[in-house]
Structure formats: structure tokens, C-alpha cells
Amino acid sequence: MRQKTVAIFGGGPAGLAAAECLSASGHVRVTVYEAMPTVGRKFMLAGKSGLNITHAEPYERFAERFGAANTFLRPALDAFRPEDLRAWAKGLGTPTFVGTSGRVFPDVMKASPLLRAWRSRLEAQGVTILTRHKFIGFERGAALLDTPEGPQQVVADATLLAFGGASWPRLGSDAAWVEGLRGQGVEIAPFRPANCGFERAWSENFRERFAGEPVKSVTARSDAGATQGEFVITRHGVEGSLIYAHSAALRDGIEAQRQATLFLDLVPGRDRERLARDLERQSAKLSFSNRLRKAVHLSPVKVALLRECVPDAAQRSPSELANLLKALPLTVSQPRPITEAISSAGGIRLSALNENYMLNALPGVFAAGEMLDWEAPTGGYLLTACMATGRAAARGVESWLNRS
């Protein structure tokens, strides 16, 4: 009996996870085609800062982190939960630990040992990995490739696409596949930056003095809720983990109203009434900065940020100042370019897929990972969902191959 073939385009976490599942039985021949010189390049980049692979918060909360895509993604996440990902990593010789924030990291704090062990497992299971093989599009049922040996056509019993989104194009996620699939009748939502920085026109003095300075111990509020953490002042505006947590809400607000406002509590844990009393007690002879330093212990960057966002802050009453310290309006004008974003929103609309991750317009062609229209905050959610959808699509492929 002829061994059936599966072609997987994209060698990131979603594509490799699908290849691992499909090749485990040994009943199908799996080939991964990757446009870049090596697989897992974005995975490796994430590993430079410790490779946050998942999150240890209660699963019900974890599964709600994907916004409008929660319902669609839930079966895939149920089948590959954060604890399953940790067990998978341990099985590849990479134990993990939970950080103080709940984020989960490999003990070695690197991506390379895990990726090497993963690739070795894939090769042991018979997976062929071909790099520098760039997908061009489909023509009469065949996938067209640009390879070092020239143009090639690939015909397989099933095809799985895992190209990634539109962030970090230099690592391979350049969304070059969009027009080819759209031409085949696949509905695709425009790509937008996610987990990104935002622009604000700082005064020259503030920008020159504080660009690169972290703003620590802050609670930020938006339509996304309240989050405590820190962010960084940049020459263009703001970025950092606290900003990323609110990026979807800020981006959507800008699209609707041309700007969005994040409200900052510069002194979490201190109530307004106590702040007002402490400010009231300060001598009127003190400078504004010294009043804030003595009454509130406010850092220079927070004092400057207060002045920048509310130019007449020094003339405000103690009660008004207390209100500003607890809810400072930081207005931003637009996201930074998608090429700088950690991830992207947009991609293949979930309505263009069936429950097995097969494209309605292209029977026998499946899709997974960040090329689908979903988004999530940083904290391990992105990687977990990429791998979970890759495995779910692999199950869909198996069902398709066994349909007769």
C-alpha cells in the first residue's frame, strides 16, 4: 500500500508540532519546507531573552486570553494545555520552571538545546526538512516552490500551511503568501501589529533626557482591564511588557478614534486620600519635583512624565494631583510598524476554516499557527497556541487521509 504524503510549509513551532504528530505513527511521509536557511528562527530569537514557552496561571484563565478567537481555539488548547507543553519539553531533555510572574521558562533559559532535540526527534521519526524552499502559490493542485535548484512543484495527499504572520519579516514571517491564498478564494483579514510599542510626540527635552528610561511599578488601565508592571520610554513613544498587555485595546481605540488613552497609576498601593494629605503637608516654597519626591517618593522619570502628560500639573491642587497620580492619562497616536511588533493580528479568517483546520476553499489544505486571525498577549500564550493549533491541524490531516 502506497505511503501517503504530507507537505508542511513553514518550519516554525506550528509546522514542526504538526510534523511531530503526523510522523509519530510512521504511517505517512512528512516533508517540511522552510523558506529560510534554518527552521525555528523566530523561536530562536525569542530564546535570546529566556524563551517564555507558556504560562502557569489557572487553565480557565489561560484559555480566555485569546479574545474573539477563544471559542475557536478552545478545543486545540484543551488537547495541548500548558502542562502538556511542559511535559513535552521535559521529554526533549529541557525541564522548565515557573518564574515569579507565572511565566514558564526552560531551566537552561535558552531555545537552542530544545530546538536541536526537537529536530533530532523529527528526523528520527522520518521527517524530511528542506530549507531555502520558498512557497510561491498553488497551481492546478500543486504547490509551487522557489528552491536553490530552481522552480519545483510539490503534489501531496495533504498540505499544511504554517507560514506565520507579518511581524519580524527578516526571520521569515513576511506574509508573502497572502495574495496567493486570497486568489484561491481564502478570506484573509488585514494584518495589524500586536504586542507592540506605540507612538507619542514627546517634547524634545523629555525625549532627550528620558528615552531608554524604564518606568517601574505602574498599574495601567484600558479596555483590556488593569495590569501592573513596567514600560520603557522610547524616542518615539512607549513600549515594554506593560504596554504590550494593552496593545490590542490601544490599537483598536486608535482605529476607531485616531488616538487612545492608557490611564497610569504611578503609585500602586497608595490611596488618593492619603496622597492628597501628604501633598498638602509639603511647603509651598519647595519645587514641584521636591514636593512630589518628599510626599510620594516619585522617581524623576515619573515626575517628568506627569509634567509631560499634564503640562499644568504644578498648578494643580493636592487633591487634583492625587487624582492624576492614580490615573494619569497617557495618550498615544498610533502603533509602531508591524515589522517591529512581537506578533500580529489578522490573517486567515477563522470562518474560512472548518473545525479540523482545513480551508473551506481548498479541500485537503490545512492551516495553523500565527497565520490564522487570532492574537494573544505575551507571556507564553503565543507559543502554546501555535503548537496547539499545529497539533490540531495535524489531527485534521489524519482525519482527511483516513476519510475513505
Image: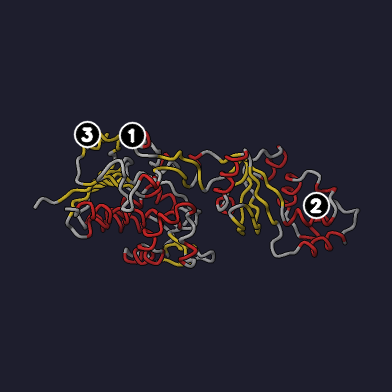
Query: Residue 333 is drawn in which quadrant?
Result: top right
Q: SS at mark 2?
A: helix
Q: Which residue is mark 1?
A: 180
Q: Is residue 74 above or below residue 4?
A: below
Query: Residue 85 is drawn in which quadrant?
Result: bottom left
Q: Which of label 2 and label 1 is nearer to you?
A: 1
**Residue sitting at x 57%, y 48%:** 249
Which numbered disc flags the more N-terminal residue, 3 or 1?
3
Residue 243 left/right relative to 328: left
Q: Which residue is mark 3?
A: 140
Q: CA distance from mark 2 to mark 1?
A: 58 Å
Type of residue at label 1? Gly
Residue 309 percent coordinates (x, y):
73, 45
Which numbered disc flags the more N-terminal residue, 3 or 2?
3
Q: Residue furthest left?
A: 1
Which numbered disc flags the more N-terminal residue, 2 or 1?
1
For disc 1, the neighbor class at 10 Å (few under 14, some 14 to 19, many from 20) is some
Cβ–Cβ under 8 Å for marks 3 and 2: no
Q: CA distance from mark 3 to mark 1?
A: 13 Å
Tell me if I can see residue 376 in this picture. yes
Nearer to me, 229 or 301:
229
Nearer to me, 192 or 310:
192
Residue 357 left/right relative to 309: left
For disc 2, the neighbor class at 10 Å (few under 14, some 14 to 19, many from 20) is some
The image's mark for residue 289 is 2
Q: SS at mark 3?
A: loop
Residue 159 left/right relative to 341: left
Cβ–Cβ under 8 Å for marks 3 and 1: no
Residue 281 left/right relative to 300: right
Type of residue at label 3? Arg
Residue 194 percent coordinates (x, y):
51, 46
**Residue sitting at x 60%, y 56%:** 225
